[in-house]
Amino acid sequence: MKKTVLFSVVVLSFLSAFTIINNPEKNILGKWKLDDSSVPKATKFLIEQTRKNNAEMAQQMEENYPDMENMVSSLRFEYKEDNSYVVETLQGPQNSTYKLVDNNHSLEITRPNGTIKKDTILELSSIKLRLLNKERGDTTLFIRP
């Protein structure tokens, strides 16, 4: 009996050494970029958002689509410990705030104009962030630059 208990304790201890602890509050911190697979969708969404306010500008963006994709792929997103969120663009940084909600299953971004964007977290590890973007109705994959 003692050997069985001892063996069980040793096996459980050994297996627990390989357990990866998922800590969303820490995993999200730092810089991210769009994965190449998400760049086309994000670029099209940006053009469509622009079209709502400036059809002429959206047309110019479509005419320069490869340049727009390059610009979107160069965006860097940073989540900081103080819950600030910065998007680094060619035009300069855009500051917002963020918080993990719904027991770390959703990400809320509060934009400078006060609007809140809430996405569902499908995957969050130290190297991947996959969000269900409710505004676009699709998923976006972020990776470390």
Image (spheres, rainbow, N blue to C red):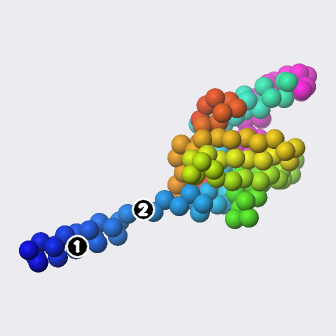
Q: Within 10 Å of the Cα at label 1, are there few (<14), some (14-19), or many (20+) other Cα atoms?
A: few
Which residue is found at the position 49% from the left and 59% from the top?
22
Q: Can you tell which of label 1 and label 2 is closer to the viewer?
A: 1
Q: Is residue 123 magenta?
A: no
Q: Within 10 Å of the Cα at label 2, are there few (<14), some (14-19), or many (20+) other Cα atoms?
A: few
Which residue is found at the position 12% from the left and 72% from the top?
4
The Cα–Cα distance between marks 1 and 2, rounded to whole angstroms, is 19 Å
Viewport quadrant of the C terminus:
bottom right
1 or 18, which is in the foreground?
1
Res. 139 visible in picture:
yes
Are circles 1 and 2 on residues that touch, CB within 8 Å? Answer: no
Residue type at the position of mark 2: Ile
Which residue is found at the position 90% from the left and 26% from the top?
53
With respect to residue 26, does 145 lie above or below? above
Q: Is residue 57 magenta?
A: yes
Which residue is found at the position 65% from the left and 44% from the top?
34
Indicate the secondary structure of the residue bearing disc 1: helix
Which contiguous range is marked in magenta? Answer: 53-76
- The spot of residue 52 in percent (x, y) is 85, 24
Check disc 1 and report the residue beneath it.
9
In the drawing, what numbered circle is on residue 20? 2
2 or 96, which is in the foreground?
2
- The spot of residue 130 in percent (x, y) is 57, 44
- The spot of residue 142 in percent (x, y) is 61, 46
Residue type at the position of mark 1: Val
Indicate the secondary structure of the residue bearing disc 2: loop
Query: Residue furthest toward the left?
Result: 1
136 or 54, which is in the foreground?
136
Q: How many marks?
A: 2
Res. 128 visible in picture:
no
With respect to residue 61, does 94 lie above or below? below
